[in-house]
Amino acid sequence: MRKIFAAVTAFGALAGAQGLGRRFSPTPDHARTRQWYECLSKPSFTPPGPVFGVVWMGLDALIGYGGYRLLQAPPSEKRRIALWAWALSIAGIAGFPYVAFRERKLGEALGVSIGLIGTTGLAIGTASHVDRKAALSGLPLFGWLLFATLLQEELWRRNPTQAAPDA
């Protein structure tokens, strides 16, 4: 695959996923969602809002780079599996804000987080047989997902009665 096409494909898919996710996130553009999120009982280790943006900027660069490297690798069964897992991870990144913030389903959002750990782990594991740099670029996302899943579990546990009123 040509380098420019691989770069546009990888980073375009990621930008699309983040754009979809942002439509439902608790940003200043979504006052009701932000108010609902701010009222949730959160654990003491919840990062301040701006940290999420900074972390995701770095993760996005690494996720895009990993996808780019996989798209550039020679075709093989491992590459195909790694790309599918990478794509499923991106779909989960796009879907999490919808489930967590639009639908306000904290338990189901925990399920999405757990699924993301699985797809990202599969992507890293299979990518390690295809392109070492692509695999390594997924490790920060995997670490963040472990933390984010712990955070999501705490949100779900601490806010059992949170439903989706007028979402």
Image (cartoon, grey):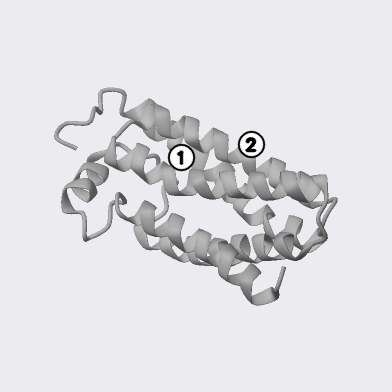
Numbered mark located on residue 48 in the image: none
Kindly identify which residue carries mark 1: 151
Q: Residue beneath label 2, please?
A: 118
Local crowd size for mark 2, using a 10 Å CA cut-off: few (<14), some (14–19), many (≥20): some
Label 2: element kind: helix
- Residue 55 visible? The answer is no
Q: Quadrant of residue 105?
A: top left
In the shown orientation, is residue 82 left or right of residue 74? left
User: Residue 113's spot in the image, x, y percent?
Assistant: 51, 37
Q: Nearer the viewer, residue 28 or 112?
A: 112
Quadrant assignment for the C terminus? top left
Question: What amino acid is at disc 1?
Answer: Leu
The amino acid sitting under disc 2 is: Gly
Give left or right: position of 152 versus 121: left
Query: What distance separates the C-alpha of mark 1 from that of mark 2?
Result: 17 Å
Residue 106 occupies which quadrant of the picture? Answer: top left
In the picture shown, does residue 141 fall above or below 114?
below
- Residue 39 location in percent, x, y? 22, 41
In screen coordinates, is 74 left or right of 149? right
The residue at 67%/55% (across/down) is 138
Q: Does dot 1 land on a helix, a strand or a loop?
A: helix
Query: Tag 2 or tag 1, which sits nearer the N-term?
Result: 2
